[in-house]
Image (cartoon, rainbow, N blue to C red):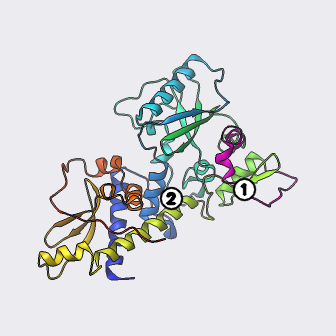
Amino acid sequence: MSRLREKFQADLDEIARDLIRAHDLKFTEGVPNLNDPLSRWVDFRLRYIDPIPRTVFVSNRFPRRVSAQVGDGLAILTSRLRSGSDVNAYQSKGLTRFNDFSGRNTSKRTDLLWADWGITHLHVTDVPLEAASEYSKRCCSNGESWLLFCLFAGDTVGLIDLKEHNDRCLFSDQDLIHALKQNWPDYLDNFRLHGILPDEEQLTDEQIGVLRQYGVNAPIVIDGEMFMGPGMGVASSSTPTLVTERVDRLRMWINWLADSAQDEEGPIVAEIRNREIKAPALSLSLVPSGISLIEETNRLVFVMNYDKTGDRYSAEMESLICPQWALDRVLPNEGTNPTGFSASAPKPAG
């Protein structure tokens, strides 16, 4: 690995640490092979619900007969999802407080329902959010506690089902996958295991929950067909496979950035020559527009402008590291971008 690649990878880890601190995420680094700050950040980032307006699709499990208070709480959530209001306060407190990718407790490293089946749950409440409260009330004003199970994809959300919080094996209830199959069969067909016949004896909900904690992915059987978990499942460490895949992609992209910054025919080297900088010291840093390259000696900022240049891959990678809501937290008083040179790294091949 080139020295600049190593430097940019170290910078990326520091950026991840800054984001972890800014969002007050639990990160104990209790397990040496799981103490990667980028993995901790990406786990949170993928689980965080981007506050954008969404088209809401409702499964055939609705409407349910529920109390007026529960109905009002469901209406509040649906309205917020449609309008693009932030709904993360209705998530489990594990999002920041209890789950820790690097922790010693395997069952608390992530949201195992999300990791296995790609399903997010929200607490339903008619109690208004308190201004100083990070999370919503866990129950309605009448004391009832219900959860809304959702599937997020782009600017859409599917409302799968509404279940009481005290239901047995709630987070490994195979009925949730059956509801996905009934309502969005084309989506679930992407995860069908072709040419594999299921065993006669099927796993119970409780067994699936236990297997997840030990990093074992259990296939789901519906009408004689087998499906893998739509969330991509968990590794033997009980960490999400999806997080590992995204982290690998990010690190490859950062290497491409390092290579493009050293490209003798590229715009960054050309600008450094134009400014007669003899020994450039390049690094990665966060600025209000996102990830940027900095020439530290002269404080020259290379603003990448991926959205403007149409580099969708790099824009996706940048958003995976630092979406606007994360930048607003870590750089709250930075104002506008510093004056700098605009450049765009080439899209990585493959």
Which label sits on residue 101? 2
Left or right of 273? Residue 6 is right
Res 317 → quadrant: bottom left
Residue 35 showing in the rendered view? no
Image coordinates for residue 202, horizontal then vertical, percent: 82, 51
Magenta span covers which residues? 176-203
* Mark 2 burial class by Cα count in 10 Å: few <14, some 14-19, many 20+: many
Looking at numbered disc 2 in the image, what kind of residue is underneath it? Answer: Phe
Near mark 1 (Cα within 10 A), the count class, few <14, some 14-19 or many ≥20, is some
Secondary structure at numbered mark 2: loop
> In the rendered view, would you say 238 is above or below 158?
below
Q: Residue furthest left?
A: 276
Residue 218 numbered mark, or none: 1
Residue 47: % across, % down = 49, 49
| Above or below: residue 194 compared with residue 47 | below
Was residue 177 drawn as part of the magenta stretch in this picture?
A: yes
